Image: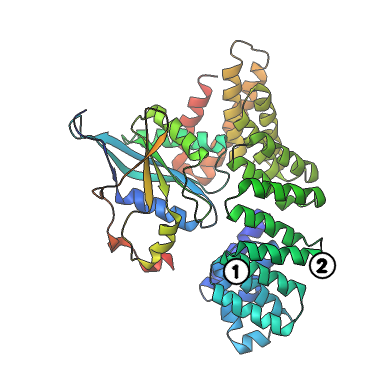
Amino acid sequence: MGGELRYQVGQNAYIKLVLHALKHKTSAVNGVLLGRLSGGDTNPVVEITDSVPLFHSQIGLLPPLEIALIQIEDYYGAQGLNIVGYYHANERFDDFELGNVAKNVGDHIHRYFPQSAVLLLDNKKLAALPKGKDGSPVMQLYTREVSRTWKLVESDGSSQLISKDWLNPELFK
Amino acid sequence: MVTKTEEAQVNRLENQVDNGGGGDWEYLCLVRKLKLRRSDKVLKHGLSILNEPKKRSSLGPDEWTLYEQVAVAAMDCQCLDVAKDCIKILQKKFPESKRVGRLEAMLLEAKGSWAEAEKAYTSLLEDNPFDQVIHKRRAAMAKAQGNISGAIEWLNKYLEIFMADNDAWRELAEIYVSLQMFKQAAFCYEELILSQPMTPLYHLAYADVLYTLGGLENLQTAKKYFASTIDLTGGKNTRALLGICLCTFAIGQLTKGRNKEDKENSDLQSLVATALEKDYKQRAPTKLSLLSSTLKSLKLSS
C-alpha cells in the first residue's frame, strides 16, 4: 500500500448520525456507516457517504441487528455501497469508552470489510452543538489493529467534515 | 409501560399542545399517569402554565402536583435553577414534608453531589423504609456514576423486597443486556413473563435474548416465544415474524442432516412468509422487494 489510509465522512452521513443521537437523548444509539473504498493503492480513502440509524434501545440483542444488516446490505449493495463501519453513542453523558457491544459489532463488520471504522460519539460535544460554537467533529474514530483491538485514530482535521453553516438553530430547539 | 393506543394518544396531545391547540393540562396529566420521560416538553408546557397566575390558580390543589412534576422535568433537562425555584415554592407551602425532602435530595443528585445526595436519601429512608422511589434513586445514582455493578446490586436488593415492580425487572434486564450477561437478562424476563404472561413485549424480549445466547435448545425455545408473541398480538408483530425466520434458519444450520422437524418447519416458514408479505404490502409496499430478498437469503440454505 502506497499512501496511508484516510477516512472521509460525508455530510449526509454525519448529519444523519448526529440527528439520530440528538433525537434520543436518554438512551444509547447506534447505526451503520455505508460507503466505499476508493483511491486505489496509492491514495486509499474510505469514503463514508451515508449512514443508517439502527437502534435506540436494547442495543445488544442479535435478532433485530441481523435482520437490519441483511436488509441494509441488500439495499445498499444494489447501489454499489458497502457497510464500511459502525457508529455508537453511549447512554451516559460522560461515558466516552468504546464498550463491548460496539467492539463486537465492529469486529463483525471488520470480517467483511477489513478497513472498517467505528465512530464513537462524544456526548459532551453533542450537547454543545445547538450553541453552534464548536465546529469540530463530535466523535472519535477507531480502526482495528492486527492485534484485534480497536485503536483510536488521531484526527488530523483534513477529513471532509462539516463547517458551521449547516447548523440550523431551529432544528435543535 | 405503555400500550400502542396510549402512546398514540400522548403523541396526538403533544402535537396539539406544541402547535398551540390547547390541552396542556390534559397532556401533563397523561404523561404523569403513564410515567413517561418527556422532560423537555413537560418543562416547556408546565412552566407556561405555572408562570401565568390565572392559569395557575385555575388548577386549585393540583398546582402543587404540577410544581413537583416540573421540578423533576427541570432536573432531567439540567435546568437546575428552575428546579430550585419550584422546590422552594413547595417548601414554603409544605414545610417538613418528606415528599419535598425527596425532591431536595434529587436536586443534590442532579447537581452531581453524590455523597450529599446519598446521605439525604439514607436519612429519608430511616423514617420511611418502604419508599420505593428513594430505593430506586440509589440504583439510578450508581448507574449515573458509571458504577454499573453497584446499580445491579442495588436493584437486586430492591427486587428482593419489592418483587412485583416490573419496571425494575425491566431496567435490570436492560442493564444485563448492555453488559452482555444474557443468562441473567433471561432470568429477569422469565420473572416478568410469570408475573404478566399476557404482555407480548416480555415474550418478544425473552425470545430475543435466548436467540442471542444461542445453542440449539435456546433457539428452539426462542422460536416458541416468538410464536407466542405472534399469538398474543394477533399476528401483527413484525419483529416476531422475522424472529421466527431467523430461528428456523439458525436451527436448520445447527441440525443439518436431521430431518425430523422438516415438514413442520417448512409449514411454519411459509405461513410466516405469507404473513410478512401481507404486512409489508399494507404498510411499506416500497420495501416489499427488500423483504423478499431477505426471506430468500434465510430460506435458501435451510
The front one of B279 and B24 is: B24
Give SS at disc 2.
Answer: helix
Which quadrant holds the C terminus of chain A?
A: bottom left
Q: Chain of mark 2?
A: B
Place of residue A63 in the rendered image (x, y in percent of width and height, measured from the top left) = 56, 35
- Spatial distance from mark 2 to mark 1, Cα to Cα? 26 Å
Place of residue B260 in the rendered image (x, y in percent of width and height, measured from the top left) = 68, 13
Image quarter of residue A131: bottom left
Place of residue B49 in the rendered image (x, y in percent of width and height, measured from the top left) = 60, 81
Tell me if residue B265 can be seen.
yes
Q: Mark 1 or mark 2, which is nearer the start of the sequence?
A: 1
The front one of B144 and B292 is: B144
Which quadrant holds the N terminus of chain A?
A: top left
* Amino acid type, mark 1: Ala
Is residue A41 placed above or below B104 in the rendered structure? above
Res. B104 mark: none
Is residue A148 placed above or below A29 in the rendered structure? above
- Reading the image, the residue beneath label 1 is B73
Q: Chain of mark 1?
A: B
* Amino acid type, mark 2: Asp
The front one of B257 and B77 is: B77
Place of residue B234 in the rendered image (x, y in percent of width and height, measured from the top left) = 69, 42
Image quarter of residue A149: top left
- Reading the image, the residue beneath label 2 is B127
Give SS at disc 1.
Answer: helix
Left of B256 or right of it: where is B188? right
The front one of A129 and B120 is: B120
Callout 1 environment at 10 Å: few (<14), some (14 to 19), or many (20+)? many
